[in-house]
Image (cartoon, coloured by chain):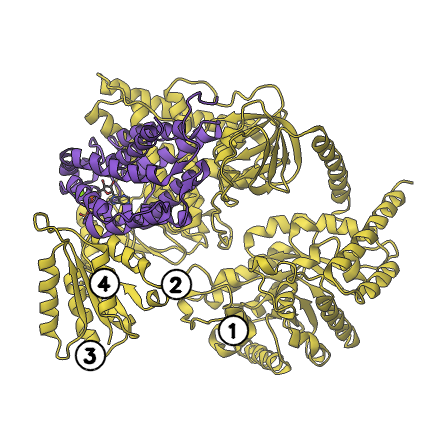
Chain colours: A yellow, B purple
């Protein structure tokens, strides 16, 4: 039977609660009381080891629920659970419910034979939260205002830029306006406060309750309606798939002597630079709290600093001119709205007048606390906003302290080193003298990273704390692509770098020159170059990349980070906006590959011991027709607006393909009944990523219009090598002849059946794979947009007939290494040829 | 910038034992002080908690010079005996810190840096906390950073430990103007401003005790 452990500061309380629970249940259930500490003089407290023993006392295969009162009781309960053996841990759950009500509710449930999950849910609900009606009453009572509920529909929710739009609209009104995220059960915040709004974490489809002054409520609500209708200026931008903020990679101990050696981090922008390091101190400095005698004057001084900061930002923005895009400018609009945030300002003013401490110290504290609050949020996008808060904070602090422009970057060209790079730092860079940028921390999704990567200089983040120990003026070599700095490089390292840089620069220039030219070999063979896409945000990049089409739109992002599956209309809107943005270039939409390494909470899928070999891809889609048909309908409807293809992931058998096509047929029938248009001739294809499909490709090909090879999964399954296991790195290599033979077989099957075949795995963009794949006859190469120019450059130096010889040869080789060697040698020869061909 | 001081090149088992004993003495001496600090923003038990914990630590400390084993024993005893939030937090600190040190009878400077880092990572995870929240981390994190910085500049163990203790002390004082965001003190909201955090204070005392113990052993 499921056991219960009661952890309380008081032994009397835990014993007493056990008695009450025992009395309430007909059948005796295992309950252990683990309260108090063994100290007769001071018996209040908790003992982690006692909790551990208690868990083991009531442990059975049915599991254990642990309840705790506050503070250390919770910490000790979690401590004890960590001390359990791993196989014990799987059976124990901490239940975050009010202690007395929770234990009693769970005990009754357990006695009635319910599952651990049900008992836990009942316990959590044991105390009803104040009902919506009560909360609404509180909201309106607070302000004497009128309330109305809205549903936020724009994909990003009330994130930085949309939040800034809302806040600036609300600031046009004079009365109090409150906002409460009803869906997330947040408390009510000041709708004129950017931080209040952002910290409410309003996501798409969340409902918010707005309360406004009766006199202007109608106008306020109309303004909100309008913003919602205009999608908060987002223009159908889909949710960005947030990459987790990467923490600095752990560095080896800071070397004793940081005058030599190398540091490695995260690559933000490639390129090489050689020059002296110049540290730019950008962390929030410590500020001594100084007593002041005239708080009013201090407040005046503070307000002046705020308006000076705004003037500065506007000045820097206009000086930056074309250098930053309209979209990125909005980052700084958000900065300006921090300067107007009533919550922040009131806190600071209040503390100045109460505590009689200088504005600098108070501002620093408020900014720091706020940045920590952001940093502690779940959502990685919001976490990254901590950097923006500090950025604004620093600016105001500098102005308060009467220091001039922080960016006194020496005239001498140098490599700038930051603790953390902030958006403003990028804005004020003097591009003439900045050779490169490195930073000790930072992730790839921060605003600063986005801005810095557009600078055309090498940028590396997350080099670790050791960066601070590199002396000012020290010569370093910065390699953006390798995400590395070499401290005090010797002459040969410098020479190597200079050669590489020269080669790289030439290369970039030559690649740029062919970006928009056709992907055509020297002997006139054309292939299609396509881009892989995983969010609507990438549209601009793709349109500039030289891609002829989108060879793979991953759709998992639509399903992640939300509480319910996306509906047909919502998906249709997104696909349609992509089709429109592509302006006639074909879009290949891959139906959702849910499962495997991409779990989705609301779908209630079973945990699998081996998810990569599990219930995912098309297998799963076929089993949940509703989800599948919704997506098919949305894709089909988008096909009315431009060329669209449907592609199924993780196919293993002919039957699966037939079943999937039947689904498509039935959705088409439904659309006809609904009188909704779609492209009757839309192409349907499958991914070749399971060895079974490659082997059966000749029998699958007649069923479909195209194939696309997914090299990552194909390699992992052919070689039986988990891609996440670093020990299997050599096995997990698509250049293994076994994988190449599978690819060759699929290409032949496709061409025998007169259908085209592409590739959308990582291999497709690899220059050394290009001659092999070309020789094997691949028709379409789909890759990340960043690889396209270079790929075209490679391709345009090759000739199909020679590539055929190469590919025939490598299929007979016995190791991945020798395949790579042959291909590199071949490329080396052809690069020389391409050059001579280019000089008239 | 090498320190001319002829300090030890490694930290030995006996030094760690001396650290633990010094800590126990310090907590006996500061019991009232710590509980006083805990009274305006807590439940006035922190001094008593730490003193009870470290008394028990001394009783249970195993023989031998295996530093990992010594520190693990400290951890398990604190988890059982401290009673307050500091129990699981310091327990985790010593437990996580001890893991890579099992079987070692001598610690290099790099080992010590690693110890600080692992220990702090453990506390952050256990407490779901970070610097700036008015907790022991406000003393511990600057201490670890100062240790690393001094090490990076070529300072030897003792110099690095002194730097760590100084940084812990400043970090402890810096908790005064902070508003607590974790632990009992956070229930007080703004009223927690203006008081020094008891946990940051005990953390400073522990770091200072380490520096003192190593210094004494090398005299
Ligand atoms: N979540 C946390 N993360 C880090 N440190 C914390 C956390 N919670 C409390 N602390 C630290 O613990 C100190 C208080 O320790 P103490 O032993 O007095 O616990 P307590 O608050 O009385 O515990 P209890 O929860 O049992 O009442 C605080 O001063 C603070 O430094
Ligand atoms: Mg206490």
The nearer-to-camera label among 1 and 2 is 1
User: Can you tell which mark lies on residue A53?
Assistant: 4
The nearer-to-camera label among 4 and 3 is 4
The answer to whether the residue labelled 3 contacts the one labelled 1, judged by CB atoms less than 8 Å apart, is no
Q: Which residue is mark 3?
A: A112
First in sequence: mark 3 vs mark 1: 3
First in sequence: mark 1 vs mark 2: 2
Secondary structure state at the residue bearing disc 4: helix
Chain of the residue where label 2 is placed in the rendered structure = A
Q: Quadrant of ligand 1?
A: top left
First in sequence: mark 4 vs mark 3: 4
Q: Crowding at label 2, few (<14), some or many (≥20) Cα neighbours within 10 Å?
A: few
Q: Which residue is mark 1?
A: A614
Q: Crowding at label 3, few (<14), some or many (≥20) Cα neighbours within 10 Å?
A: few
Chain of the residue where label 4 is placed in the rendered structure = A
First in sequence: mark 4 vs mark 2: 4
Secondary structure state at the residue bearing disc 1: loop
């Amino acid at each position: 039977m499921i056991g219960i452990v009661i952890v309380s500061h008081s032994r009397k309380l835990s014993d007493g609660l056990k008695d009450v629970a025992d009395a309430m249940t007909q059948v005796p259930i295992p309950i252990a009381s683990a309260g108090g500490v063994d100290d007769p003089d001071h018996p209040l407290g908790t003992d982690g080891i006692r909790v551990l023993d208690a868990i083991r006392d009531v442990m059975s295969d049915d599991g254990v629920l642990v309840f705790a009162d506050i503070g250390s009781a919770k910490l000790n309960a979690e401590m004890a659970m960590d001390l359990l053996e791993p196989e014990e841990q799987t059976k124990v759950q901490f239940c975050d419910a009010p202690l007395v009500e929770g234990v009693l509710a769970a005990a009754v449930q357990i006695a009635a034979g319910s599952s651990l999950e049900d008992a836990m849910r009942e316990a959590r609900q044991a105390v009803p939260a104040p009902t919506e009606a009560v909360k609404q009453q509180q909201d309106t009572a607070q302000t004497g205002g009128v309330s109305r509920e809205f549903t936020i529909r724009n994909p990003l929710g009330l994130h930085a830029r949309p939040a800034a739009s809302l806040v600036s609209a609300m600031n046009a009104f004079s009365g109090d306006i409150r906002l409460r995220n009803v869906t997330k059960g947040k408390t009510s915040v000041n709708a004129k406060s950017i931080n209040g709004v952002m910290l409410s974490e309003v996501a798409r489809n969340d409902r918010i309750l707005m309360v406004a002054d009766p006199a202007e409520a109608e106008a306020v609500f109309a303004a909100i309606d309008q913003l919602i209708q205009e999608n908060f200026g987002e223009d159908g931008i889909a949710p960005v798939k947030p990459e987790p903020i990467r923490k600095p990679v752990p560095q080896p101990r800071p070397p004793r002597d940081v005058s030599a050696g190398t540091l490695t981090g995260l690559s933000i922008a490639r390129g090489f630079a050689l020059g002296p390091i110049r540290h730019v101190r950008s962390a929030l400095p410590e500020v001594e709290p100084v007593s002041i005698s005239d708080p009013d004057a201090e407040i005046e001084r503070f307000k002046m600093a705020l308006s000076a900061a705004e003037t500065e930002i506007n000045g820097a923005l206009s000086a930056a001119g074309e250098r930053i895009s309209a979209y990125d400018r909005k980052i700084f609009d958000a900065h300006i709205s921090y300067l107007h945030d009533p919550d922040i300002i009131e806190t600071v003013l209040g503390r100045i007048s109460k505590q009689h401490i200088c504005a600098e110290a108070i501002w620093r504290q408020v900014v720091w606390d706020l940045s920590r609050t952001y940093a502690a949020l779940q959502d990685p996008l919001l976490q990254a906003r901590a950097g923006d808060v500090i950025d604004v904070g620093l600016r105001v602090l500098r102005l308060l302290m009467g220091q001039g422009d922080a960016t006194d970057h020496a005239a001498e060209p140098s490599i700038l080193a930051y603790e953390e790079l902030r958006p403003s730092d990028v804005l004020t860079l003097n591009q003439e003298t900045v050779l490169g940028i490195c930073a000790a921390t930072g992730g790839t999704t921060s605003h600063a990273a986005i801005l810095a990567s557009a600078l055309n200089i090498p940028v590396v983040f997350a080099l670790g704390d050791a960066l601070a120990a590199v002396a000012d003026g020290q010569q370093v070599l910065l390699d953006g692509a390798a995400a590395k700095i070499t401290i005090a490089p010797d002459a040969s390292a410098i020479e190597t770098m200079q050669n590489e840089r020269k080669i790289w620069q030439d290369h970039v220039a030559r690649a740029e020159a062919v970006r928009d030219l056709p992907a055509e070999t020297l002997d006139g063979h054309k292939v299609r170059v396509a881009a892989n896409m995983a969010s609507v945000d990438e549209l601009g990049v793709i349109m500039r990349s030289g891609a002829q089409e989108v060879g793979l739109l991953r759709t998992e992002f639509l399903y992640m980070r939300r509480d319910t599956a996306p509906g047909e209309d919502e998906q249709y809107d997104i696909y349609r906006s992509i089709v429109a943005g592509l302006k006639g270039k074909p879009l290949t939409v891959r139906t959702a590959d849910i499962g495997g390494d991409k779990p989705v909470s609301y779908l209630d899928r079973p945990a699998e011991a081996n998810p990569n070999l599990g219930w995912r891809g098309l297998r799963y889609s076929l089993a949940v027709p509703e989800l599948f048909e919704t997506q098919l309908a949305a894709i089909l409807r988008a096909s009315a607006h431009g060329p669209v293809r449907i592609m199924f992931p993780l196919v293993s058998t002919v039957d699966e393909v037939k079943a999937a096509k039947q689904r498509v047929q039935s959705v088409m029938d439904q659309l006809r009944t609904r009188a909704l248009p779609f492209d009757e001739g839309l192409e349907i294809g499958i991914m070749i990523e399971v060895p079974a499909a490659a082997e059966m490709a000749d029998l699958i090909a007649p069923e479909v219009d195209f194939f696309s090879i997914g090299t990552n999964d194909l390699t992992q399954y052919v070689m039986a090598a988990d891609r996440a296991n670093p020990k299997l790195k050599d096995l997990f290599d698509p250049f293994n002849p076994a994988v190449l033979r599978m690819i060759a077989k699929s290409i032949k099957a496709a061409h025998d059946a007169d259908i085209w075949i592409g590739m959308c795995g990582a291999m497709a963009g690899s220059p050394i794979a290009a001659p092999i794949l070309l020789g094997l006859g691949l028709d379409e190469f789909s890759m990340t947009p960043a690889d396209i120019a270079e790929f075209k450059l490679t391709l345009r130096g090759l000739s199909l007939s020679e590539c055929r010889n190469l590919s025939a040869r490598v299929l007979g080789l016995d190791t991945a290494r020798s395949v790579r060697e042959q291909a590199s040698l071949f490329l080396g020869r052809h690069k020389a040829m391409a050059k001579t061909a280019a000089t008239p | 910038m090498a320190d001319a001081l002829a300090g030890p090149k490694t930290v030995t088992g006996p030094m760690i034992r001396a650290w633990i004993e010094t800590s126990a003495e310090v907590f006996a001496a500061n019991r009232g002080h710590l509980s006083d600090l805990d009274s305006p923003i807590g439940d006035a038990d922190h001094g008593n908690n730490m003193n009870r914990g470290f008394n028990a630590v001394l009783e249970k400390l195993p023989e031998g010079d295996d530093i990992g084993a010594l520190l693990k024993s400290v951890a398990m005893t604190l988890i059982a005996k401290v009673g307050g939030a500091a129990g699981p937090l310091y327990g985790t600190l010593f437990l996580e810190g001890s893991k890579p040190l099992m079987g070692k009878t001598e610690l290099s400077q790099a080992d010590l840096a690693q110890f600080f880092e692992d220990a702090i990572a453990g506390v952050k995870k256990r407490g779901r906390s970070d610097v700036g929240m008015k907790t022991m981390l406000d003393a511990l994190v600057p201490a670890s950073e100062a240790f690393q910085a001094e090490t990076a500049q070529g300072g030897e163990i003792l110099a690095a430990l002194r730097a760590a203790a100084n940084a812990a002390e400043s970090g402890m004082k810096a908790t005064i103007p902070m508003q607590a965001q974790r632990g009992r003190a956070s229930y007080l909201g703004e009223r927690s401003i203006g008081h020094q955090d008891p946990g940051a204070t005990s953390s400073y005392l522990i770091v200072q005790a380490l520096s003192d113990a190593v210094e004494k052993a090398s005299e």
